[in-house]
Image (cartoon, grey):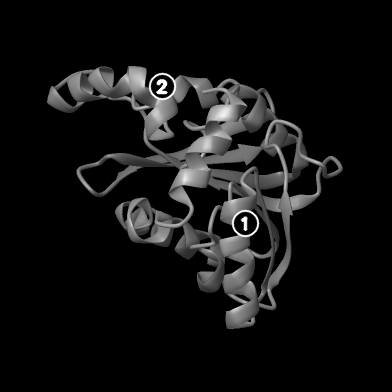
Amino acid sequence: MDIGAVGTSYRRWAPVYDRTFGRITNVGRRRAVEYLNARSGTLLEVGVGTGLSLRDYRPHLSVTGIDYSDEMLEKAREKVRTEGLQHVAELRQMDARELDFPDESFDTVVAMYLVSVVPDPERVVAEMARVCKPGGEVLIINHFARERGFLAMLERVFAPFANTLGWHSDFRIDRVLGCDLLTEAERRTLPPLGMFTFLRLRRT
């Protein structure tokens, strides 16, 4: 997907995202937040979107969120204002391919349902690794293409419509596993139907 298509897609999704795709991804988001709440320190959420996860982070975390879409971010900022989410340190508009943070800034970096919707996902993962502290973790929740079966066939059918749908249905996991700074620590499937993957990477 090109960056223009990303902006257009999420302008279209912003008003209804929480009630549509947000519900489909709710289980994976809860699992991720449960894991992240057991960690400490500074947390960067890349692709924070409308801020669906922000209210569920525990107060001991200092949370920064970035997103490319101003329309999505405005929904997130409204949640922070109306719910008094004091653990949210900052929400900024930013391109995930060029994170405007120094090296080794965060204890944990998370991207939920992001890597298959951005141009140059390898560069995005490299940036996430760069801003993560040594010994820290990068957590990715995402759909990755199946190798075989009926659902794999459907993924290939929908693949040409990535710019319209706002995500790549045939996105392969090996595209996020090539960063030299990261080693795989855990991988498991998530409901519904094992459609999503919980991928935990450790910053070396």
Counting other residues with Cα less than 10 Å from the Cα at mark 2, is it few (<14), some (14-19), or many (20 or more)? Answer: some
Residue 147, position in %: x, y?
26, 18
| Residue 50 drawn above or below residue 116 | below
Residue ID for mark 1: 73
- Residue 134 image label: none
> CA–CA distance between discs 2 and 1?
28 Å
Which residue shows up at 58% across the image and 37% down it? Answer: 7
Would residue 181 appear left or right of 112 to someone viewing this image? right
Q: Which of marks 2 and 1 is nearer the N terminus?
A: 1
Would residue 37 appear left or right of 164 to someone viewing this image? right
Residue 142, position in %: x, y?
42, 39
- Label 2 or label 1, whichever lies nearer to me, is 1
Which residue shows up at 40% across the image and 62% down it? Answer: 30
Q: What residue type is labelled 2?
A: Arg
Which residue shows up at 81% across the image and 49% down it? Answer: 105
Would residue 137 appear left or right of 115 to someone viewing this image? right
Q: Is residue 136 visible?
A: yes
Q: What residue type is labelled 1?
A: Leu
Residue 102, position in %: x, y?
86, 43
Decide which of 188, 50 is in the foreground and name it: 50
The quadrant of the picture occupied by the C terminus is: top right
- Residue 172 image label: 2
| Picture quadrant where residue 75 is located | bottom right
| Picture quadrant where residue 167 is located | top left
Residue 114, position in %: x, y?
51, 39
Would residue 204 appear left or right of 165 to someone viewing this image? right
Which residue shows up at 14% across the image and 22% down it? Answer: 149
| Mark 1 secondary-structure assignment | helix
